[in-house]
Amino acid sequence: MSSTSLRCIGLTGGIGSGKSTLGNMLQECGLPLIDADAISRQLTSTGGAAIEPLQEIFGADCIDANGALDRDHMRQLVFSNQDAKHRLQQLLHPLILVQIEQNIQVLANKGNSLVLIDIPLLVESSHWRDRLDRVIVVDCEENTQVDRVVSRSRLSPDAVRQIMAHQASRHQRLAAADIVIYNNDISLDELREQAKQISL
Ligand code: ATP
């Protein structure tokens, strides 16, 4: 079976919007999930396929003592340097896309008819426009994003807002959505209920 018989559903949202949470809930409902962020972390962890080229492009400073990508260092670099951001994307995006396509093929070969792909930068990348059958956007207020990320990480509110400023805007994301889940002022149980109601 080719991957054309498998419908690809994109899942996206800004940092802290709750896309991983919703993705896990949809997975619990039986949808297979491909997580682009997990693939990126794997590529940039110790021994990952991106480590050697990263070191060649950005120097030894971008690799930490364990041989993994130093995320804080790289975040600071790409925030202050557009060219570095571009080069990082040029390196990582093709590697991530190849892995996603391989995972899609595996799921298609197993006879799945639907796959959910969690793609944080879906709206930022032109690649996905023609590749996805539907797009789910998890939306929430910006203050909610900041509160959630601050409480689950060691980032300051300013640092979170800086990351958000480098992501697509709410407006851009909503414009790309076929389905919007407004994950604000609702409990996790209510979100789970919405996950069960989504018709794909
Ligand atoms: P990132 O882009 O940073 O990976 P994300 O969009 O995947 O973020 P999640 O990790 O799913 O966001 O959620 C961020 C945090 O907010 C998590 O700790 C999650 O448990 C919490 N959260 C998400 N939605 C709700 C909700 N409706 N009620 C309470 N907590 C929530």
Image (cartoon, grey):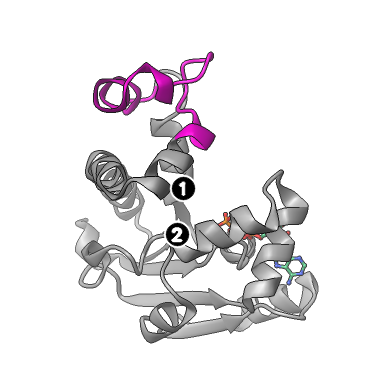
Foreground pick, 191 / 86: 86
Residue 148's quadrant in the figure? bottom right
Q: Residue at x 30, y 75 (%)?
A: 133
**Residue 67 seen in the current view:** yes
Q: Quadrant of the N terminus?
A: bottom left
- Callout 2: CB less than 8 Å from ligand 1: yes
Mark 1: which amino acid? Asp
**Residue 27 seen in the current view:** no
Residue 3 left/right relative to 169: left
Badge 1 crowding class, 10 Å Cα cut-off, few under 14, some 14 to 19, many 20 or more, is: some
Q: Secondary structure at mark 1?
A: helix
The verdict on residue 72 being magenta is yes
Q: Secondary structure at mark 2?
A: loop
Q: In this picture, is 15 found above or below 44?
A: below
Q: Which residue is mark 2?
A: 120
Q: Quadrant of ligand 1?
A: bottom right
**Residue extent of the magenta highlight:** 48-73
Coordinates of residue 77 in the picture (x, y in percent): 40, 39
Q: Residue at x 71, y 43 (%)?
A: 154
Q: Residue at x 57, y 78 (%)?
A: 139
Residue 194's quadrant in the figure? bottom right
- Callout 1: CB less than 8 Å from ligand 1: yes
